[in-house]
Image (spheres, helix red, strand yellow):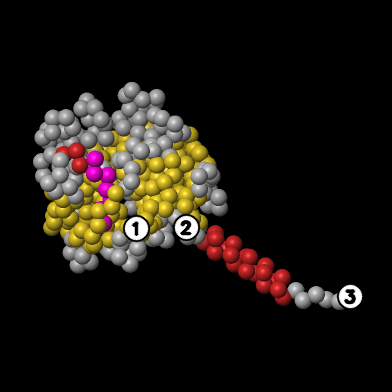
Amino acid sequence: MRMRNLWPLLMAGSIGAMGAQAAFADTYQLLVGSYTAGQSQGIYRLNFDSSTGQISAKPLQVVKSENPSWLTLSKDQRQLFVVNENGPGQTDPVGRVSSFAINPKTHALSLISQVQSLGNEPTHSSLSGDASHLFVSNYSVSEDPGGTLAVLPVGADGKLKAVVQMSSHPSSRVNPERQMSGHVHSTISSPDGNYVFSNDLGADKVFVYRFNPKANPQLPLIAADPAFVQLPPGSGPRHLLFSADGKHAWLTMEMTAQVAVFDYQDGKLEQTQMVDLAAGQPTSDKAAAALHASADGKFLYVSNRGTANQLLVFAIDPATGQLKELQRRSVEGDHPREFSLDPSGKFVLIANQKSNQIVVIERDADTGLLGNTVQKLPMDAPSDLKFLLRQ
């Protein structure tokens, strides 16, 4: 029997395998949190192709959950923590926090636990540096009872325990509509994990705590000295982000649409710059929200909602952390609550909450500038976007 030349077939098979590997290498899974007063059912797990910038229209998984508006991943991405931003007048009037296990092979989510946040409209959460505690920011839309910071122990298996500590802050009362009580909007740890910073929109302050659970497991947070960072009256601090080297930090102030720049050392923030996102513009343009830095630390991206609906691009001075504006780009939608740079760095994904869409925009990794829109995916009230990296 005459042997056929199998080399072309083997080569074709090899090329096919390499092509499949390349295709797999370009694909990531994306988790989308949302508000569920409309058609959304909760958390959506989708495929994202970083070679084309396309999100799959068909979800890999839909996890039913009430108002899972903020998603927090553990460092090893084996666990997901979700705030259920519930409150009076909603389908579920009780603020809650849920934890999920993430299958290391498929990334499928399965519920581990759910507990009450002991406050209304929990809007943000973050893990302590050692992953032993979850810090939950109960925003509380209503003046009474007002916002609180809740501290929840977390088991090694991701199981949440009941709240062990609550903190509330006196309000500034500058804005009679939004600042008659505290409204804790976010809380994060310092890069070394020794301090916790709680941003209170209602107080115009960032409150600073020492984190020491070994000294007192029931009261792991102790007020630092100084106990807060004072911000301009009526500014409404929202989200704080540390630089990768831990030497600087940036803070969005929602109500005045500004970004404060700080030097950071050992629990102390010293302001060095204040940047206006909507200088000279009407109050309706002023609603700063999310901020994220590029992986190389060269660029900072900030969303401004209101009637502006823009994403602003800044160059970061590596020595000082100060910002230089490079670009203002329409988000081509309404109310960009959150956004995310994809793992390849080639795209920015924007969750336009009120126009019910996720918009994908090209990004130049060298210049930091945003380019063409490549996709507008219909999605009911998206609120947060987190990528799952391959194990």
Instruction: State the residue position of label 1.
Output: 371
Q: Which of 188 and 260 is in front in this view?
A: 260
Work out whether residue 43 can be spotted: yes
Mark 2 residue type: Thr
Element at label 2: loop
Q: What residue range appears in magenta?
A: 307-314
Image quarter hosting the N terminus = bottom right
Name the residue rendered at 32%, 48% in the picture: 331
Mark found first going from the N terminus, 2 or 3 = 3
Mark found first going from the N terminus, 2 or 1 = 2
Element at label 1: strand
Name the residue rendered at 23%, 62% in the picture: 316
Q: Are the residues at dot 3 and dot 1 in contact (C-beta closer than 8 Å)?
A: no
Residue farthest to the top, as pictured: 89
Q: Which of 217 and 154 is in front in this view?
A: 154
Mark 1 residue type: Gly
Name the residue rendered at 39%, 29% in the picture: 37
Q: Position of residue 128 (x, y in %)?
A: 33, 49
Give residue 1's mark.
3
From the image, state whether disc 2 or disc 3 is nearer to you.
2
Q: Where is residue 118 in the image (x, y as percent from the top left)?
A: 32, 31
Give residue 52's mark.
2
Q: Is the magenta stretch mostly helix, strand or loop?
A: strand
Element at label 3: loop
